[in-house]
Image: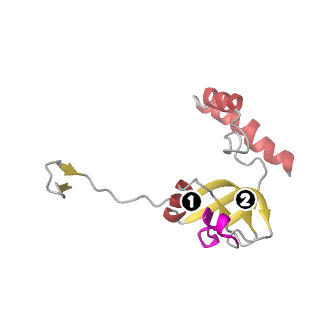
């Protein structure tokens, strides 16, 4: 606790240490072959990258041209040295949406919220939506 650090009679300020997640996962529209990731205006993704020990990124598309090659794209790019692993995953944000690319699947989110209220419902959801999907893709 710090008592009135500015001396303006505002009381006490609580200081707490920043969290450092072991792993963070983000999804973005675009990356390049060097692992640089386009985050655009979504500056919270840079904060997540800076804080995390490991950053896993999925993107809609990986391009050959460096995102750092032009002034226009470089400003909204997270440098690849923050990225631990990168994979292309089209529609990878679903059932959440990806701003300016596709909307959230509200039916899927509603179904998850309803089923996840119980352990049995959550396990059924995982079997149907996660594990069965993975097995079908293999």
Q: Write down the residue under mark 1.
A: 23
Number of residues whose C-alpha sits closer than 10 Å to that of mark 2, classed few (under 14), some (14–19) or many (20 or more): many
Q: Is residue 48 left or right of residue 136?
A: left
Q: Residue at x 73, y 71 (%)?
A: 66
Q: Secondary structure at mark 1?
A: strand
Number of the front mark, 1 or 2? 2
Residue 89 pos. (x, y %): 77, 54
Q: Which mark is residue 30?
A: 2
Q: Secondary structure at mark 2?
A: strand
Q: Residue at x 67, y 28 (%)?
A: 111
Q: Is residue 111 magenta?
A: no
Residue 101 pos. (x, y %): 73, 45
**What stretch of residues is rendered in magenta?**
70-83
Q: Tell me the distance, in whole angstroms, between the alpha carbons under discs 1 and 2.
A: 20 Å
Q: Quadrant of the N terminus?
A: bottom left
Q: Quarter of the image holding residue 32?
A: bottom right
Q: Is residue 75 magenta?
A: yes
- Which of marks 2 and 1 precedes in the sequence? 1
């Amino acid at each position: 606790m710090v008592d009135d650090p500015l001396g303006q009679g505002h009381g006490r300020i609580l200081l707490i240490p920043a969290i450092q997640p072991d792993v963070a996962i983000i999804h973005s529209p675009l990356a390049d072959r060097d692992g640089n990731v386009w985050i655009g205006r979504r500056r919270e993704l840079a904060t997540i990258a800076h804080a995390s020990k490991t950053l896993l990124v999925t993107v809609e598309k990986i391009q050959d041209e460096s995102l750092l090659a032009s002034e226009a794209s470089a400003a909204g790019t997270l440098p690849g040295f923050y990225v631990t692993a990168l994979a292309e995953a089209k529609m990878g944000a679903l059932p959440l949406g990806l701003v300016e690319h596709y909307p959230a699947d509200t039916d899927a989110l509603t179904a998850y919220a309803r089923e996840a209220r119980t352990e049995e419902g959550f396990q059924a959801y995982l079997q149907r939506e996660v594990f069965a999907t993975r097995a079908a893709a293999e």
